[in-house]
RNA sequence: GCCUCCAUAGCUCAGUUGGUUAGAGCAUCUGACUGUUAAUCAGAGGGUCCUAGGUUCAAGUCCUGGUGGAGGCGCCA
């Protein structure tokens, strides 16, 4: 029976496409979730959204006895299937609307229990309702931008003959050098097997040794790059740092290109290229969502003083596209900072005393937001404050590192040219007490056909922060994992 | 890990030097309205003032512990 009925039912049109149609008078079907309902004696209006676009479609319902009964079941959050006629709108807010002939309530939403209302909710409140926050304009817009950026990243690399490599998520290496790791085990934590000398007997664990979640795909990425020339990874990354900030997650996504025969200048070119490529992609494909997010940001900041407000979102993105990033050696940065007003007047919490100081985020922000007023790539840091695998400069003091610093976000990319010389790399590993047993395979690549190569890590959520104008990284990933927080 | 701040209706928030019956807007419900745009107008219901103690004649307000949340710093992407 159902089969017969379906044959004469009009196929669903997604709202994104329905709003572009001009064949007025056509029978259409739309399905979605109710954002608002408002009505008078003779006619009711339902704003329906199906996530295909930030925009809603207006459903017009002529009131009669049957419709009145049905409308009693329609509240914000309810799911509807609407059969009706595509009509040129009489109202001023939209070009097209659907005059309902039949509305099926697919799923009710009890207004006493449904927490979302057609009004502004705080981001903190929505974070506690993360399982429903896709239903809001802000979070659906972020989700669509996030998707577009995933797609753009793969596009960028594919167009340039990079190969995507799936580096392992579970790693046996416990010294990747990028942070605290989450341990992976199948051992019974209530009764952990011990060796004779009282230590945990990892021989009895799943892999026969201790295992962790990856903090970076870089080391494995390098192995691939030293055969395939140009590779990138784009995967989940796990850091067990007790970081409580608006820009750190315990589980986040990172893009890590690694390229043979690239020096640091090539590496910086690549970093600047990909950032500009994906920003351009967002402007070309996500304008509706960006405009909404721009308004949201301006609304959020309306109580701030004029000089504390952010640059308008779309203007900011276009500005970054138009400007070359500043490329500045660490030594120069120190000179600028030491001569800066806040340093001389001791306004910095950490006053720069001289060369060798680690730059605090207040210093990075000064360079990016006050001094240069555009993205800055800092290079050639002191070896002492950077990772073991970075290529040592001839001055014996600095390494070929680069950090790309963005306004508000801070470090969006961290990378370097890698040390390709076996002896220099080996002595760094020894000097830093990194166990050779976990690093021997990495060292092997420097024995056989070693070449200069470079790469970096781009924090995907930090990129989304920049693109959406959001200020808390917990709002640009669907289900954020942070210390003491593993809900949903 | 360190420092600072916050918790009042379903949501967002006000609540004076501690003082009588804790308020507003939105949401919900009822009614009005011939096309609204987070509709509007009139009315109604809705409170363990986070929690456990303490100070006081008297605590939403002051003090201490706990819980939950936010921001800054560090680590970094």
Image (tube, rainbow, N blue to C red):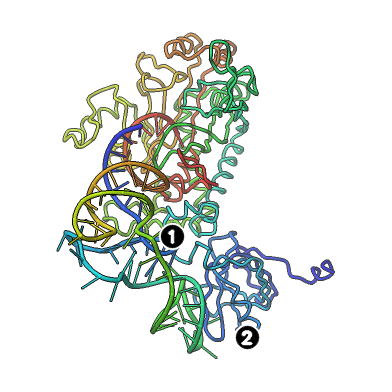
The answer to whether residue A356 is seen in the rendering is yes
Up-down relation of residue A386 to residue A110 (above or below): above
Chain identity of mark 1: A
Percent of width and height locating residue A313: 41, 53
- On the rendered structure, is A440 left or right of B5? right
Image quarter hosting the N terminus of chain A: bottom right
Q: Which residue is mark 2?
A: A64
The answer to whether residue A140 is seen in the rendering is no
Secondary element type, mark 2: loop
- On the rendered structure, is A83 left or right of A72? right
Q: Which residue is mark 1?
A: A121
Percent of width and height locating residue A267: 48, 29
Q: Could you tell me which residue is drawn at 55 percent across and 21 percent down?
A: A173
Q: Could you tell me which residue is drawn at 53 percent across and 34 percent down?
A: A237
Percent of width and height locating residue A98: 62, 75
Q: Are marks 2 and 1 in contact (CB under 8 Å)?
A: no
Out of A248 and A98, give the one closest to the viewer.
A248
- Mark on residue A113? none
Up-down relation of residue A126 to residue B72 (above or below): below
Up-down relation of residue A72 to residue A172 (above or below): below
Query: Label 2 vs label 1: CA separation?
Result: 34 Å
Choose the circle earlier in sequence order: 2 or 1: 2
Percent of width and height locating residue A450: 56, 14
Chain identity of mark 2: A
Secondary element type, mark 1: loop
Q: Could you tell me which residue is drawn at 38 percent across and 38 percent down?
A: A410
């Amino acid at each position: 029976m159902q089969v017969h009925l379906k044959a004469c039912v009009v196929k669903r049109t997604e709202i994104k496409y329905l709003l572009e149609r001009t064949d007025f008078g056509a029978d259409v079907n739309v399905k979605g979730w109710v954002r608002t309902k408002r009505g008078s004696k003779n006619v009711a209006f339902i704003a329906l959204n199906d996530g295909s676009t930030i925009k809603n479609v207006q459903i017009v319902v002529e009131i009669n006895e049957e419709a009145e009964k049905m409308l009693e079941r329609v509240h914000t959050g309810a799911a509807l299937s609407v059969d009706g006629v595509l009509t040129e709108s009489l109202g001023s807010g939209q070009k097209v609307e659907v005059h309902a002939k039949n509305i099926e309530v697919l799923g009710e939403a009890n207004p006493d229990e449904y927490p979302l209302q057609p009004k502004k909710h705080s981001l903190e409140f929505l974070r506690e309702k993360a399982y429903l926050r896709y239903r809001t304009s802000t979070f659906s817009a972020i989700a669509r931008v996030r998707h577009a950026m995933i797609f753009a990243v793969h596009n960028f690399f594919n167009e340039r003959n990079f190969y995507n490599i799936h580096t392992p998520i579970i790693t046996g290496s416990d010294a990747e050098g990028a942070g605290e790791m989450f341990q992976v085990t199948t051992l019974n934590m209530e009764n952990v097997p011990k060796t004779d000398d009282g230590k945990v007997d990892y021989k009895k664990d799943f892999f026969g040794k201790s295992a962790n979640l990856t903090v970076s795909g870089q080391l494995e990425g390098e192995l691939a790059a030293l055969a395939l020339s140009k590779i990138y990874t784009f995967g989940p990354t796990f850091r067990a740092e007790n970081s409580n900030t608006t820009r750190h997650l315990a589980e986040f996504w990172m893009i890590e290109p690694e390229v043979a025969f690239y020096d640091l200048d090539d590496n910086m070119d690549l970093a600047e290229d990909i950032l500009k490529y994906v920003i351009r992609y967002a402007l070309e494909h996500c304008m509706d969502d960006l405009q909404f997010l721009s308004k949201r940001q301006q609304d959020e900041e309306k109580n701030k003083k004029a000089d504390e407000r952010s640059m308008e979102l779309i203007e900011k993105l276009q500005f970054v596209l138009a400007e070359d990033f500043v490329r500045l050696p660490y030594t120069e940065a120190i000179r600028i900072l030491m001569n800066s007003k806040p340093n001389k007047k001791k306004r910095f919490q950490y006053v720069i005393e001289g060369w060798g100081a680690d730059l605090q985020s207040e210093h990075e922000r000064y360079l990016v937001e006050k001094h240069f007023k555009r993205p800055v790539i800092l290079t050639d840091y002191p070896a002492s404050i950077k990772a073991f695998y970075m290529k040592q400069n001839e001055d014996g003091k600095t390494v070929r590192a680069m950090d790309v610093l963005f306004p508000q976000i801070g470090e969006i990319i961290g990378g370097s040219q890698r040390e390709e010389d076996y002896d220099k790399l080996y002595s760094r590993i020894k000097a830093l007490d990194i166990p050779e047993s976990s690093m021997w395979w990495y060292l092997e690549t420097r024995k056989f056909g070693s070449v200069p190569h470079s790469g970096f890590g781009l924090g995907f959520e930090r990129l989304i922060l920049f693109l959406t104008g959001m200020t808390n990284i917990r709002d640009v990933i669907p289900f954020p994992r942070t210390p003491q927080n593993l809900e949903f």
